[in-house]
């Protein structure tokens, strides 16, 4: 393909496949809306845990309490507008710090990280006309080799039996594996980890766990009969075919800036 390369962030791929029209409204048309409180909670937990893990990796470890300052800052000093909904920033702060500490106590000690927030500014895949960019939460090393870990917060992240939700994450994980490999110059071959942090207002409901995803990159490549997801994404982007999905769980004015004018809902 000789077409101009179109750049896409790895974190936006799930939205592109869930509802191309919503993706277009945000990333092509630049329509904006406030972030949800749940999304900001995730950002806050990512900020605190990254400081904790990076300090350990660099040989100057800080405590979970010390790293929790980043959680507080992310909640009370957001970089964009936030619609907190039914929860106040103070409520989100309490939950965020609790999940942060649970991660630091239950997950981090078991991990052998070699990179924290590994960023690949641009990975060009010229034969299908796209370039990928993004930041991988963690890269670890195990007996199976190098692998990536992605932190997910949510109200269905970890079941009561400790099972971590992995369904629906494979495509994004596969792209992060490509990006991490390019950023570090390593072959990423170990099964990926989904680090789930269950959001709840009480300690009893909050949980942490690790789920695994193997063979994710098979989704990206495809075969002679079935195109891979990257090819599908490229075809959609270059053709400008951004159809809507009114059956999406996120087809809601809270999540889509084009909801009120979307022709696909008729």
Image (tube, rainbow, N blue to C red):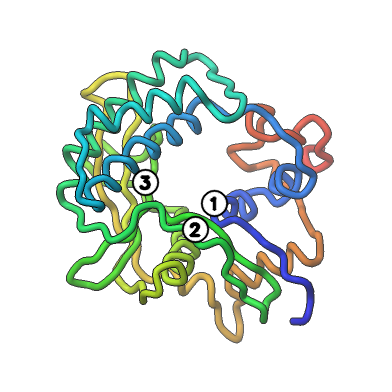
Residue at coordinates 53% horizontally, 56% vertically from top-left?
134
Task: Give the labeled residue for mark 3.
Answer: 151
| First in residue order: circle 1 vs circle 2 | 1
Answer above or below: position of 119 versus 159.
below
Crowding at dot 1, Cα within 10 Å, few <14 / some 14-19 / many 20+, comes out as some
Where 257 falls versus 168 (above or below)? Answer: above
Q: Give the SS element for disc 2.
A: helix
For marks 3 and 2, give the CA distance.
12 Å
Instruction: Locate residue 224 relative to residue 47 in the image: left or right.
Output: right
**Left or right of 208 in this view: 166:** right
Of callouts 3 and 2, which one flags the residue occurring earlier in the amino acid sequence? 3
* Residue at image point 25% right, 52% down: 58
Circle 1 sits on which residue?
11
Q: Residue at 76% across / 49% down in the picture?
A: 28
Q: Position of residue 151 (x, y in %)?
A: 37, 46
Where does the image place residue 26, in percent across and percent down from the top left? 71, 43
Callout 1: helix, strand or loop? helix
Q: Nearer the viewer, residue 40 or 50?
A: 50
Task: Name the residue carrying label 2.
Answer: 172
Pair 1/2: label in front: 1
Looking at the rendered image, the quarter that the C terminus falls into is top right
In this view, the residue in front, 73 or 93, is 73
Do the residues bearing badges 1 and 2 touch, measured as CB atoms within 8 Å? yes
CA gap, disc 1 and disc 2: 7 Å
Where residue 76 sits: x, y (%)? 47, 20
> Where 27 falls versus 127 (above or below)?
above
Which residue is pictured at 47% across the width and 13% down the height? 88
Q: Position of residue 90 (x, y in %)?
A: 41, 13
Sequence-wise, the earlier of marks 3 and 1 is 1
């Amino acid at each position: 393909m000789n077409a101009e390369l179109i750049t896409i962030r790895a974190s936006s791929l799930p939205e592109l496949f869930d509802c191309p029209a919503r993706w277009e409204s945000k990333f092509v048309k630049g329509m904006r809306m406030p972030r949800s409180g749940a999304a900001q909670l995730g950002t806050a937990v990512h900020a605190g845990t990254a400081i904790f893990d990076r300090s350990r990796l660099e040989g100057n470890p800080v405590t979970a309490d010390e790293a929790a300052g980043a959680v507080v800052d992310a909640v009370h000093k957001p970089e964009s507008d936030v619609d907190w909904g039914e929860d106040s920033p103070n409520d989100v702060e309490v939950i965020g710090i609790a999940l942060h500490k649970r991660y630091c106590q239950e997950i981090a000690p078991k991990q052998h990280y070699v990179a924290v927030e590994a960023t690949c500014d641009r990975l060009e895949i010229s034969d299908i006309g796209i370039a990928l960019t993004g930041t991988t939460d963690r890269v670890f090393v195990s007996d199976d080799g190098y692998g990536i870990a992605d932190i997910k917060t949510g109200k269905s992240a970890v079941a009561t039996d400790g099972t971590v939700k992995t369904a629906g994450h494979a495509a994004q994980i596969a792209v992060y594996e490509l990006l991490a490999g390019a950023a570090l110059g390593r072959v990423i071959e170990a099964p990926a980890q989904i680090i789930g942090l269950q959001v709840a207002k009480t300690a009893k409901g909050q949980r942490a766990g690790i789920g695994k995803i193997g063979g994710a990159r098979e989704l990206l490549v495809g075969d002679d009969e079935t195109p891979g997801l990257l090819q599908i994404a490229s075809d959609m982007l270059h053709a400008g075919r951004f159809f809507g999905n009114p059956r999406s769980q996120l087809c809601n004015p809270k999540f889509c800036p084009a909801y009120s004018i979307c022709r696909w809902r008729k």
